[in-house]
Amino acid sequence: MTQSLVPIILAGGKGERFWPLSRKQRPKQFLCLDGSGRSLLQTTADRLLKTAGGWDNLWVVTASHLADGVREQLPELPEANILVEPEGRDTAPAVAWSTVEVAKRYGKDVVTGFFPADHWIAEQDIFEATLMAAVEAAVEHSAIVTLGIAPTHAATGYGYIEQGEKIGLFGQAYPAFKVDRFTEKPDKDTAETFVSSGRFSWNGGMFVFLASVMLAELHQHAPEIIQLLEEKGIDAYSTLPKLSIDYAVMEKTDRACVLPVQFSWDDLGDWGAIERLMKSADHPNVEFGQHVCLDTSGAIVYTSDEDELIVTIGLDDTVVVRDGKVTLIVKKDRTQEIKAVLKTIQERSEFQGLL
């Protein structure tokens, strides 16, 4: 069976954990974080282009203040394929509106998929084969197929998917399973139990489904969203509830299936992810830009100005980021607290231009 896929990239995220490199007008998806010279949004588009069959079938949904940045980074993308939310209402309205619009153009039998703009994925050939297997499962079983990431440790910051009954083997290599349950961000003991059982995947936020199936499930589980969108379109956006697609549909539907993936994945959640991608056994630090150090190891050093030099002495396991008029220095095990600092900065009028 061969059926095309219309991919939709979700590109409205803030990426605050990468501040100060990531700002309101330049969120994480607009940044290059792997040394490739391409932003995360651009590499996501590159990754999906072959499966989509070209730019005409690739879509992006983004926030109004980011739309110009999307156009600049993806100049080949047709203007009609850029869906601009007037305000962020979380992923359920974004998925619902995008699905409605895609179904208008291609018909309700179209297979579509949603992909975050700010993740890192390797093994392009395996990724493409995985998508084709997901398309096959979605069509044959009228399923909403979520791509499950194999846990590498007992993370408490991810949602988990428990696999149930096997529904088949797709693409000759990819088993898919009914979803028994979704669990959002468990505590450490629960996460360790999940990982040791071998029955759980991380929820990577990637979904593939027939438009008709998602629309039907939205009508059943989130009528307050889909009915207004079908009646009023974008004019209804400000009145929609803020809900994630996981809460609105995936945790309630009986059509959810999980297809465990075999490609390498990272959600690039904070500065520590850069070390996972770029750490070399031959060098004690990860460096973007000019860095001279003495007795420094385990550091992540980033300067956005190639003419600037960062000098460190006696630092261990520290992140140093220099961008514009802002310098961040933080221990690696405390980078999750950047969001808390941003709240303080937001309260200071003299610092508003630094957000």
Image: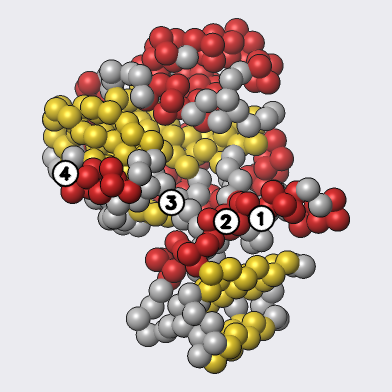
Instruction: Check disc 3 and report its element: helix, strand or loop.
Output: loop
Give the mark nearer the N terminus: 1 vs 4.
Answer: 4
Instruction: Check disc 4 and report its element: helix, strand or loop.
Output: helix
Q: Where's residue 257, x and y in %? A: 26, 28
Do labels 1 and 2 touch, CB within 8 Å? yes
Residue highlighted by disc 4: 197
Residue positioned most to the right: 350
Looking at the picture, which amino acid does disc 4 mark? Answer: Ser
Instruction: Check disc 2 and report its element: helix, strand or loop.
Output: helix
Residue highlighted by disc 1: 341
Q: Nearer the viewer, mark 3 or mark 2?
A: 2
Give the mark nearer the N terminus: 3 vs 2.
Answer: 3
Q: Is residue 59 above or below residue 299?
A: above
Residue highlighted by disc 3: 267
Residue highlighted by disc 2: 337
Task: Give the camera-side residue of 169 and 27.
Answer: 27
Q: Is residue 285 above or below residue 207?
A: below
Disc 3 and disc 2: Cα gap in Å? 18 Å
Q: Where's residue 165, x and y in %? A: 14, 27
